[in-house]
Image (tube, helix red, strand yellow):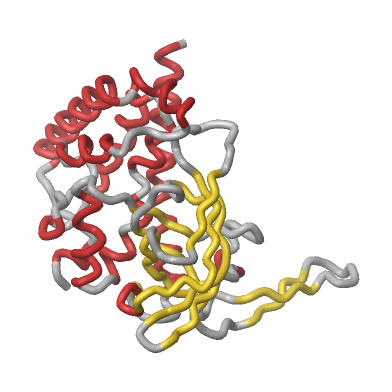
Amino acid sequence: MNASQQAGSSPLADPEEERNDIETLSFLVARFAAKEIAPHVREWDDAGEFPRALYQRAAQLGLLGLGYPEDLGGTPSSQRMRNALAYSLARHGASGGVFASLLSHNIGLPPIVRHGSTELQREVIAPVLRGEKIAALAITESGGGSDVAALRTTARRDGDHFIVDGEKTFITSGMRADFITVAVRTGDASTYLDVLGDMPGSQQQARGARGISLLVVPGDSKGLTRTPLQKMGWHCSDTAQLRFDNVRVPARYLIGEPGDGFKMIMGNFNAERLAMSVAALGFAQACFDEA
């Protein structure tokens, strides 16, 4: 297993050295957020987005590449270091919207790091970590969010391409993403019965986890339509509904093996939920300090 397949993990660090690194990183992020984010949040919320240049500024400080393989432009780090980044950005950035979109690559790229081909990693991950491109993850559909096994978006093999049809919703960075990691159904699904009591019609059939795959869809693909969604908060984080109408995607953009997508998604969710929990702590601390 090469460095790219290890998702940017680092060997066990000396505890004292790591504490010093965390303090340094926290100071760096706090200064970055206070200068580059906090003064502009209201303006960006009114505009519904923040400047793309912010990605490049964050990349120049190494913030986008934290936890990614060095050969792809990242900096391998421990989970504690990544937690420190999430906490400090939330604590000092004063914007959940900036946090969500600026770091949306952290949910879109990990499956590619762990399971993507070397060619795909270099084409997608490297420019994102440089702040030149934006990455997003598209799983949720209007018919279900947490029930990933019930997704309906399909990707049918056609020679050297997949043809994608379906819809996704509530996609962070969905309007601007250059690369979208999309959960699709590429094969037959197992069927299970969900019995919800004794009432007539309580037996509901749903597609199962088998047959789900992950596919990177370029943002400029013909047949991809994006619609911005209005939200009650996090206004500067662009959130979109995506529609795929006969979108042709080269087969080399498939992540890993067909049918392995469900396992990848479940592993992805674990890290995503941890990051959101750490960020929530940072936001709570900011509220407490300002009270």
Image-based side of 129 in relation to 273, left or right: left
x 35%, y 76%: residue = 250
Q: Residue at x 44, y 33 (%)?
A: 236
Name above or below for residue 57 compared with residue 229.
above
Q: Is 81 located above or below residue 47 in the figure?
A: below
Of 17 and 285, the residue lying toward us: 285
Residue furthest top in the image: 291
For this orientation, the residue located farthest to the bottom is: 159
Q: Residue at x 19, y 34 (%)?
A: 22
Q: Residue 162: where, in percent of width, then height?
A: 43, 79
Residue 253 in view here: yes
**Can the viewer see residue 84?**
no
Q: Quadrant of the N terminus?
A: bottom left
- Look at the picture and state if 92 lies above or below 257: above
- Residue 63 in the image, given as x and y percentages of width and height: 21, 40
Which of the 4 image quadrants contains residue 124? bottom left
Task: Check the image and name the residue furthest to the right.
Answer: 200
User: What x and y, as percent, mark residue 238?
Assistant: 46, 41
Q: Position of residue 103 (x, y in %)?
A: 34, 44
Left or right position of 194 against 267: right
Left or right: residue 30 versus residue 214 is left
Residue at (26, 47) in percent of width and height: 79
